Image (cartoon, rainbow, N blue to C red):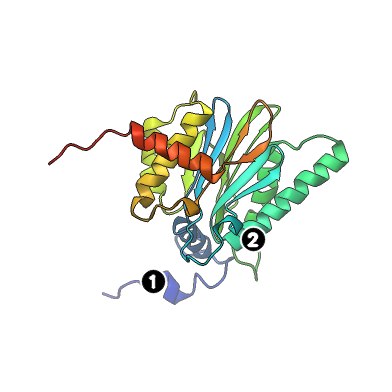
Amino acid sequence: MQQPMPHQIMGYDRAITMFSPDGRLLQVEYAKKTVRQGSTAIGMVCREGIVFITDKRIVDSLVVAEAVEKIWQVDDHIAATASGILSDARVLIERAQLRAQQHRVTYDSAIDVLSVVKDVSNLKQFCTQSGGLRPFGVSLLIAGIDDTGAKLFETDPTGIYFQYRATVIGEGEPEIEEVLKKEYREDLSLDDAIKLGLRALYKVIEKDFNYDRIAGAYITLANKRFTKLKRAEIEKYMEEIRKSAPKKKDQ
């Protein structure tokens, strides 16, 4: 009996506009795999605002770690991070920044988070149905604080988006998602949310942990201002995490 040929051999993955016989867009699925191989990014909504904790994955000791961006300011009250092809992310972030600036100039008010998410997602979706293009190989976490409160969204390469209370993208997703489901609460304080994010990320990259590769940022409900965590602050939080961790019993 003749075995069915793989979809790749049959050519269904050569064009973004071509569906396979079982209704899949293989180029989009490849883009999702790229995201799963990307560096980890965590987002959370807490009692006092929103928090991002990310892995910059600095693999070369000669790289200037401070010059590597993994969390971007879209507007005073909106931030974003990404996993996947970060050059693709940069294009989308710059589009989001421009959209926020145009809204502020036109209406003399801050744009709402959902409008930014929809604009980015529309471009991602357009690239899944147009010949000669490829999908964006990146997922974004976009979060901010507007008149309706603190919001966190995830957009994937298909252009779909979901609102989350807490989520993670990238290579550490399975392990960190398990931690978030067990330990995340909506009433976490800002400090506790940062500690939870750092503790979950440390669990994934423990052997290769280095402060140069960790980045964090937050926006509070009180001032609606994007603020990056300094290295000294991250070190302080990690020291508190280590002190509070249960000591291992001698074997």
Comparing 45 with 22, the one in front is: 45
Tell me the residue at 51%/26% (across/down): 189
Task: Name the element at disc 2.
Answer: loop
Residue type at the position of mark 2: Cys
Please tell me whether mark 1 or mark 2 is closer to you in this view. Answer: 2
Residue 95 at x, y = what percent? Answer: 72, 53
Q: Quarter-wise, where is residue 90 in the image?
A: bottom right
**162 left or right, relative to 126:** left
Comparing 206 with 173, the one in front is: 206
Tell me the distance, in whole angstroms, between the alpha carbons under discs 1 and 2: 25 Å
- Sequence-wise, the earlier of marks 1 and 2 is 1
Q: Do we see residue 203 in this rendering?
A: yes
Above or below residue 229? Residue 165 is above
Tell me the residue at 32%/34% (across/down): 245
| Label 2 sits on residue | 127
Residue 152 at x, y = what percent? Answer: 58, 37
Residue 47 at x, y = what percent? Answer: 54, 25
Q: Classify the position of the N terminus by image quarter.
A: bottom left
Q: Classify the position of the C terminus by image quarter.
A: top left
Q: Label 1 crowding class (10 Å Cα cut-off): few <14, some 14-19, many 20+?
A: few
Label number found at residue 6:
1
Comparing 7 with 58, the one in front is: 58
Q: Quarter-wise, where is residue 112 in the image?
A: top right
Task: Name the element at disc 1.
Answer: loop
Q: Label 2 crowding class (10 Å Cα cut-off): few <14, some 14-19, many 20+?
A: many
Comparing 38 with 5, the one in front is: 38
Residue 49 at x, y = what percent? Answer: 59, 30
Tell me the residue at 39%/31% (across/down): 183
